Amino acid sequence: MSETPQPSQPEQPADAGPATDPQTGEDLSWRQTAMSAVLLDRSAPDHREIGELLTEIFEGSFQVEHGTDDDPATAVYIEDATVIVTSVDAPIPDGHAKNNTRELAVWNGGEAVVDTHRSQVVVIALRLGPVGDDGEVGPPDYLDPRSEALRCELAVANVTAALTALPGAVAVSVGGAANTLPAVAYRDFVTGNPIPVPVLVGVRAGRRSETTASVYTTGLSRFGRMDLERLDVEAPPGQLYSQMCDLVAFALSSGTVFQPGQTLELGESRTLVTSTEQSPFTGQQVLRLTAG
């Protein structure tokens, strides 16, 4: 296993949220705008093609507001999250999308297709408040910041999965997780899992020696958590991958934030002890899980 590209920091819209939690005073500088991009090997679709596809897929489930020639952004309303879809007739620059395929087993050697993409459809989600009597949008109701981050990321994932049905879709890039996945695999992960960890977080597992394997995550900081890793475990990479996905899914769905020095129960009398360490894969401070 080798060094992995670091998650990028997407530009934050002006209404992305306060810098501190209004109830707890917690520093929320970890927050990012939920964002992904569907990569296509063709010119960018216009707002009509995007709006028609999303209306067909979400009919009866979510409201879709079509873009116009003057304002081409398409909006999808999922509970209290507003998902904005826009097309960009240019590829992701500097090879970042291809770099983020590294060591993801789901590609199985087919990652060169990412280099064929010519355009992207960008998807972001925000929680916007109700419209007041003056016609202005007010602040949204308070929600725990980690729950809010998950809600917006899941809204992005659902709309992004639908957009992989666009002709020419080859991959999906989640820059904040250093994660680029095949379009079909992305859709399958989202439709098959209530918390689709492999699309929300980069999870990479591989051999470190003939008898040991390691696994680590990228992108958990977007959910107000430290990334996780296990080093030199005598187990197959696939087993470590599945266990890590289960741990992340549990943490996200339950609101649990693992802390240094904590003991985690894996069942069958197996435990993991957590400690803050510098990752040999990303160079960042992570929560390392070691057999207790």
Image (cartoon, rainbow, N blue to C red):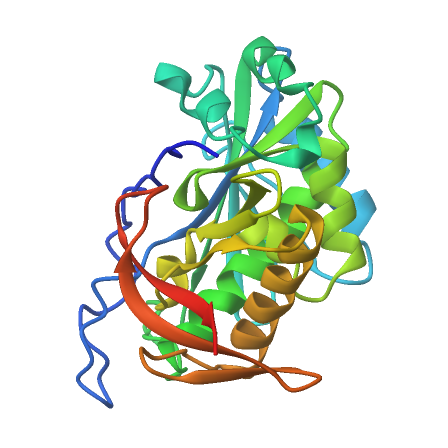
Relative to 61, is 50 above or below? above
Relative to 145, is 43 above or below? above
Residue 34 is situated, as x and y percent measured from the top left of the image, at 44, 53
- Can the viewer see residue 130? no
Of residues 257 and 274, which is closer to you in this image?
A: 274
Residue 89 is situated, as x and y percent measured from the top left of the image, at 49, 16
Residue 217 is situated, as x and y percent measured from the top left of the image, at 47, 52
Image point 43% across, 21% down: which residue?
92
Of residues 6 and 41, which is closer to you in this image?
A: 6
Total labels drawn: 0
- Can the viewer see residue 85? yes
Image point 37% across, 41% down: which residue?
281
Relative to 19, is 48 above or below? above
Image point 47% across, 76% down: which residue?
147
Q: Residue furthest bottom?
A: 23
Residue 50 is situated, as x and y percent measured from the top left of the image, at 66, 33
Residue 93 location, quadrant: top left
Of residues 246 and 150, which is closer to you in this image?
A: 246
Image point 40% across, 34% down: which residue?
4
Residue 142 location, quadrant: bottom left
Q: Residue furthest front?
A: 211
